[in-house]
Amino acid sequence: MVEPYRLTASQALALMQKGELSVEDYAKSLLARIKERDHVVKAWAYLDPEFVLAQARDLDQIPPEKRGPLHGISVGVKDVILTKDMPTCHNSDIYRNGPAPLVDAAPIITLRASGALIMGKTTTTEFAAVVDGGPSTNPHDSTRTPGGSSSGSGAAVGDYQVAIALGTQTAGSTIRPGSFNSIYALKPTWGAISREGLAQYSMTCDTLGLYARSVEDLELLSKVFKLEDDEPVPAAPFPVKGAKVAFCKTHVWPKAGPGTKAAWEKAQELLKKAGANVEELELPAEFEKITEWHANVLAGEGRTSFLGNYLLAKDKLNKSMADQVENTTKLSRKAQLESYDGCARLRPVWDEIASKYDAVITPSAVDEAPVGLARTGDPSFCSMWTILQVPCLNIPGFAGENGLPIGLTLVGPRYHDLHVLHVGKAFGKIFEAEGGFQLKLF
Amino acid sequence: MVEPYRLTASQALALMQKGELSVEDYAKSLLARIKERDHVVKAWAYLDPEFVLAQARDLDQIPPEKRGPLHGISVGVKDVILTKDMPTCHNSDIYRNGPAPLVDAAPIITLRASGALIMGKTTTTEFAAVVDGGPSTNPHDSTRTPGGSSSGSGAAVGDYQVAIALGTQTAGSTIRPGSFNSIYALKPTWGAISREGLAQYSMTCDTLGLYARSVEDLELLSKVFKLEDDEPVPAAPFPVKGAKVAFCKTHVWPKAGPGTKAAWEKAQELLKKAGANVEELELPAEFEKITEWHANVLAGEGRTSFLGNYLLAKDKLNKSMADQVENTTKLSRKAQLESYDGCARLRPVWDEIASKYDAVITPSAVDEAPVGLARTGDPSFCSMWTILQVPCLNIPGFAGENGLPIGLTLVGPRYHDLHVLHVGKAFGKIFEAEGGFQLKLF
């Protein structure tokens, strides 16, 4: 039998349902994996093995008929999300070594009520609001960043230390680590999952993100979080043959590195081979403004969001956050409002464009994870979709010049999250099998 | 000397700065007032007099040069806002008698860092999401509701039990209690104050609200929370003479009761007498759709927000909230998105209309506070402005057929909060002096 830590959530769940795996043995396997790898990957901000085992044993005591849909499934939680029994430190000197807050964020309430095994807190950049990285490393090459700000969540799932992890995305913080760590990452439609109890940076952009090593696992989570499209998704696999697939480079394309460019070509080739009708999609010129609008919205909203901690302990706050409170860029309210209204105007325009296709593909990141831990990478390819508030799925499978993972993003119209997963499962099978990425880990 | 509990925040602050009032004596006066009145008004969900006094003594120990801009000022906190040292129970059977969460909501961090004396938690309707009232009563007539969902905050400030209180508004939960309790209530522009650590119902509408008994106090809070318009507000009082003032009945006007109608006439008469140019403002017909859009957005967002507690303990959750999770109204994502986009389209339209006037007045509530505690009243006049995300200030001063308070709302374009306060201070002086409300309390 394969080591339990290697199982996806769906695989582990199936074994547990058949009585072939206890939560305790599953947890022990994961903890052993973490023990083996933590000195390299450093994905955890908080982990108490004894507490994990105690929870696992409690879960094992629940009679089968009372078990939840995520019974025993291991979840890592980005350390900007409140957990009642574990500290939430935001990678901030203000909150380091703080107590457990005795209150759960809304998504944690949902996960616990569904039987999940909350393993621990995963590393984040400071308040998920900066790009200064470390200490976590990329499991595929420890000299490189795992991306951020959901650094530990991406790395832990990529390194088989946990089946599921929660991240957040305000620019590219869920999708980019997804690409860098060769895992599936879903940033759902804005508002589809409650954000209560998550650190706040941008009310307009902050979105809970979900990591897993299979689309099946994300589908399982989508059921738990009651994601729902208007149109039911067919039970049968999405037929790639005959599918209308748009490749949308966006105005950010000049930033694309050789790895992303190669993945772009390869994906088109693979989808064409599978019978899809592939075409290039060029967005109306106004969409180019979104990059600046996104920056304005974050600057205006960060000004509000970081005020409390600025007043409490400015000296312990990242300078970029203090600068936002002080509005050092002199952003006017007028520019902030024009940015809100511009993005709001383009949301239905995007929905209409996207609805003409079965799928729209766009880059996830500039290239492979860059060397070094000091910076978590460039979110430019993601921020547009975040502020358009549309579902984004990173699909892994490609490799860059150094053999490191590269993913591509499937984007959809708002509230077509299940459709995106349905298509993503079919595309993922192809990209994982033939995209060229070879897992060198282990 | 007047009893300290009767002082506005600005008045108390001035005495403290002159060394004529200690925080401890101020707190003792408030606690005595609460002791005298609590059996009638029942505004507090949590209050520990010993803890309040201990905090007050600690504040008195701070040397004058290190005191914050709100040094010692009493603040009541709606019990849907996290406070590290007091339980947050949301008036929910799920969280009743829970522990203090050891974490502060962002606005509480700001208030504490500014030296505020956090008195306790004030009553709310369940999760600030329903209109089922009680146990709090209206300080002006204990057979009537103080409004809701910020019931205790409105009642406590109206009853001189605290100088300042925090509420929230998703439909009319800050402005309506403002009107019913004869106090000033500011619902700032959406996003102007952080919402981190507040219970979440609607991401699009939830806004922190501020209560006080003078506009000076709200101006003090606006400095603490760094509200800022693009145009600086003149130091001189707003000149009512020659001001261009629009009265905007909105499509909800047929709901207005005799008290609101009389206040409407009286306000026009008073402003005209003071030299203002008063005119009626009729909004474009599309604004009528906002009532339905607001309902759709709340239904769609409540579906997400209440999921966790629904899964945790559906039997302990208000049926209306469970219905939202179950989407019993069969709201489609399409209708939800059209509602988002419709409101977003009208926001800049409203800003442009409002910018043509120095001030726009609109009703705060249907009428005086209705008899009975079972329902907290009708938010219809407020919900439009909430989802337009614009600043709203309830100005008290008028009286209904039973001599109970009625206020009117000053609304402005987005991010003109300071302008609204500036105008509101001038209008408030007139309305309070000549509007007809006579304080019968005490």
Image (cartoon, coloured by chain):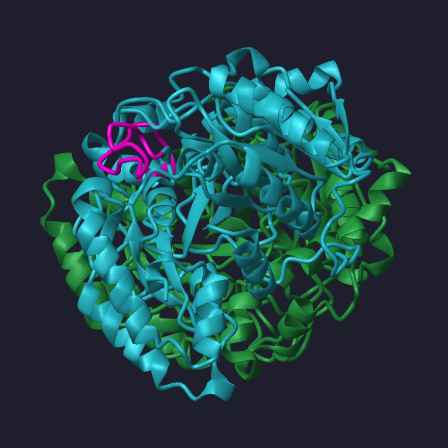
Chain colours: A green, B cyan
Q: Nearer the viewer, residue A299 or A406?
A: A299
> Number of numbered discs present?
0
How far from the left and from the top, in percent, is residue A420?
Answer: 58, 34
Q: Nearer the viewer, residue A191 or B39?
A: B39
How far from the left and from the top, in percent, is residue B138?
Answer: 31, 35
How far from the left and from the top, in percent, is residue A106?
Answer: 37, 47
On the rendered structure, is A356 left or right of B328? right
Which residue appears at 37% of the width and 33% of the height? B147
Query: Can residue B12 be seen?
Result: yes
Q: Is residue B232 magenta?
A: no
Quadrant containing the C terminus of chain A in the rendered view: bottom left
Q: Nearer the viewer, residue A414 or B134?
A: B134
Residue sitting at the far top: B254
Give the residues in magenta. B127-146
* Image vertical order of residue A436 relative to residue B127, above or below: below
Which residue appears at 22% of the width and 69% of the height? B51
* Image vertical order of residue A305 relative to residue B354, above or below: below
On the rendered structure, is B141 left or right of A307? left
Residue sitting at the far right: A285
Which residue appears at 31% of the width and 41% of the height? B441
Q: Nearer the viewer, residue A132 or A361?
A: A132
* Image vertical order of residue A87 relative to residue A275, above or below: below
